[in-house]
Image: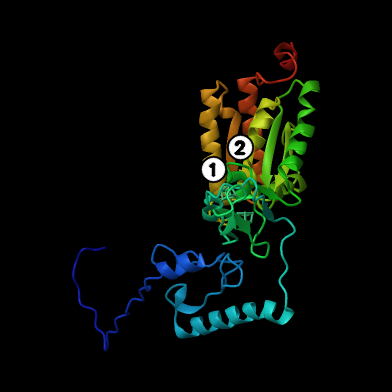
Amino acid sequence: MLNTTFPIPADKVVLSAPIIAHDNKALAEMLKIPIDSHGFFLEAHVKLRPVEFATDGIYLAGTAQGPKNIEESVSHAQAAAAKALIPLILGYVESEPIVGVVDPEVCVGCEFCVDVCQFGAVSMEEVESKELKFLKELKAKINPALCKGCGTCSSECQVDAIRMRHFTDDQILAMVHSALEEPATTSDPFIIAFLCNWCSYAGADNAGVSRFQQPSNIRNIRVMCTGRIDMIHILEALAGGADGVLVMGCHPGDCHYIAGNLRAELRVKFLTEVLSAIGLEPERLRLEWVSASEGKKFEEVVKEFVATIRKLGPSPHRKIPVAKAIGE
Ligand code: SF4
Ligand code: SF4
């Protein structure tokens, strides 16, 4: 920093040898587990799940995760072994009630869901073709013991072949339709917000219990992950008369399902372009990251979004005449 050379008196000089990761790419691809930019394996969550991967049943310890001394490696290995013992001692694993189910009649075998799933829960299997018995077709299959129920695959499947058990599209659309019954009786901006279960829904709760004052123009719809929000859910809300749609989820890097929020981000970006193309202001759709502890941010986002929508005026898809909607 000083850009000068000066001697330091020392009895002994010990150079620290760097620890360089093996080429772990092949193993990572085989087990469907992530590696970081330096080639070390990446745990499911640095604080909540430091000794395991997102894919259940695979654990990590020691320098597989990054440079560590012997003491740290031993503690890490003990923690991983203790974690691995839990299902062995129990003799069973508990699966999520909300899991994806593939309809093989609809699946066209594109394998997109395999790439999207962060938990290695989707695989492809060969089945006999119904039309031509001698032909084999590839169909997706979800392992319910590995599926975490984020619903990202369901929203990404272009032919709607994946249904989320106990959290179906029909159930989400029923919530949207029920909320949309309100605009016909109000002249104020009417906004539908899709909130992820783990961060933003808890953030809304935090705003409530902290008594932060905010406009009451928002109707919240809870989904497990922003990755579950299908484009059809958003378009149905806008076409049905909502003046704006807010999508709120965990900050990048904090997603409970690793990357569902990033898939949602891509979808919202695409949809804002679609809105422009069909002549609807893209500002009517917004994505925000709000964590469970950010009640204040939730309040600010809601206030700001309501003000933006108020400036834009009522949606042309309102079910009542615009004059009545703006209170003339
Ligand atoms: S994304 Fe849909 S169509 Fe493609 S393999 Fe998966 S379930 Fe089948
Ligand atoms: S719901 Fe989520 S965890 Fe389950 S298979 Fe689909 S993407 Fe994977």
Residue at left 61%, top 27%? 308
Q: Is residue 13 above or below residue 28?
A: below
Amino acid tagged 1: Glu
Q: Residue at position x 71%, y 82% from top?
A: 89
In the displayed structure, 100 sits above or below 283; it is below
> Is 77 situated above or below 220?
below
Quadrant hosting ligand 2: bottom right
Identified by mark 2, the residue type is Met
Mark sitting earlier along the chain (1/2): 2
* Residue 267 coordinates in the image, percent (x, y): 55, 40
Q: Secondary structure at mark 2?
A: helix
For label 1, the residue is: 265
State the residue at coordinates (54%, 43%): 265
Q: Residue at 40% across / 62% down in the picture? A: 37
Above or below: residue 310 compared with residue 6? above
Percent from the top left, x then y, of residue 228?
64, 46
The residue under label 2 is: 231
Q: Nearer the viewer, mark 1 or mark 2?
A: 2
Q: Quadrant of the N terminus?
A: bottom left
Mark 1 surroundings: few (<14), some (14-19) or many (≥20) residues within 10 A = many
In the rendered structure, the answer to whether residue 194 lies left or right of residue 47 reads right
Label 1 sits on a secondary structure element that is: helix
Residue lying furthest bottom in this view?
11
Q: According to the image, what is the colour scheme of the structure?
A: rainbow
Residue 196 is situated, as x and y percent measured from the top left of the image, at: 67, 48
